[in-house]
Image: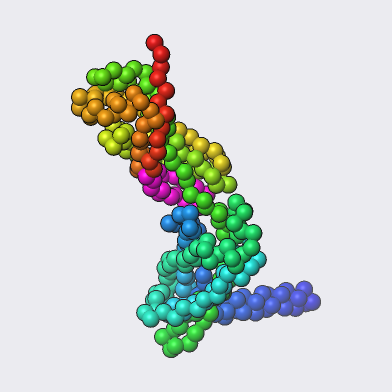
Amino acid sequence: MKKFIVRAAVLGLLAAVSAGFAGQKAEPEVILKDKRIVDPSPSGFTLIFQLILRNPTAAPLVLARYDYKVVIDETNYFDLQVDLNEPLRIEAQGETVIALPVKLNYENLFPVVPGLKEKDLAFCYVTGGMTFRDERRREKRALMAFSSDFPIYRGLEFEPAPVEAKSLTIGGAEIVAGIVLRNPNGFSFTIDRWTYTLELVGRPVAEGSGGEGIKIVARGESTLSFPLTLDFFEIGRPVYDGLLQPPTDARASGEVEITTPWGPWRIPFDRSAKVAVRKHRP
């Protein structure tokens, strides 16, 4: 009899707990999906947090406003509250993805966070909440908190490489030209595609692509080299004169696509310089 009473009490307790969980109200959620950096330049970039807004309730909700605070390396950078002119609707049992951008402009950032300019890596912390409203205009606020590291990006450096002249006559030349890419940053990256145009003495002499899969370490460099056969009757006598009496005016332009820890970047370049010509002696 006592065992029956104890068993009945336990079952009753479990039923009560289950009923309690079943009676809990579903609440909207903010979930971090991804984070990446876009529009990098030596003056700054934008750190984007992709967020999933999830509505587990049985009725539609709209995102009416949101607020967040940004802390960089334990220093308050800014607080912001945004009221949406057109509230974003999330259907019942549905979800949607939004982007929360944090623009990091060095001109504003460095004075606020002392010592950041000398670092290779820093951290961004975001806290705040999203305020949702149901059809009866009742509000529910979902808290959010996430973080990301980010580099102090100092740009990439490009320049035409010295020319190796294997043969040089008044009619033409066999040369090896190239473009040097230097990485002054504290992070490594991999080249996905490198497209280029090379001019000598103002005349286009080469265009193409290459460099796929090359990894460039922090503060490292790599040279994209390509052999060329030049016909001076076609491209002009000034190129011959420039190679005969160096240094020669050269211009390298194009774009490099790279994979970084913060997503893919596309970096354009356009650099002119005077380059040496190293002649091979027979």
The reply to whether residue 217 is in sight is yes
Secondary structure mostly taken by the magenta-highlighted segment of the chain: strand
Residue at image location 51% in from the left, 42% down from the top: 183
Asked if one can make out residue 146 in the rendered structure from this viewpoint, the answer is no
The residue most toward the left is 234
User: Looking at the picture, does residue 144 appear above or below residue 121?
Assistant: below
Write the residue at 59% across / 65% down. 111
Depth check: give the residue in front, 21 or 124: 124
Task: Classify the position of the C terminus by image quarter.
Answer: top left
Is 91 drawn above or below residue 135 in the view shown?
above
**Residue 249: x, y in percent?**
35, 35
Image coordinates for residue 281, horizontal then vertical, percent: 41, 13
Depicted 259 relative to depicted 12: above or below:
above
Read off the magenta span. 256-270
- 242 or 4, nearer to the observer: 242
> Dividing the picture into quarters, in which one does residue 79 lie?
bottom right
Report whether 115 appears left or right of 62. right
The residue closer to the viewer here, 142 or 58, is 142
Q: Residue furthest front?
A: 245
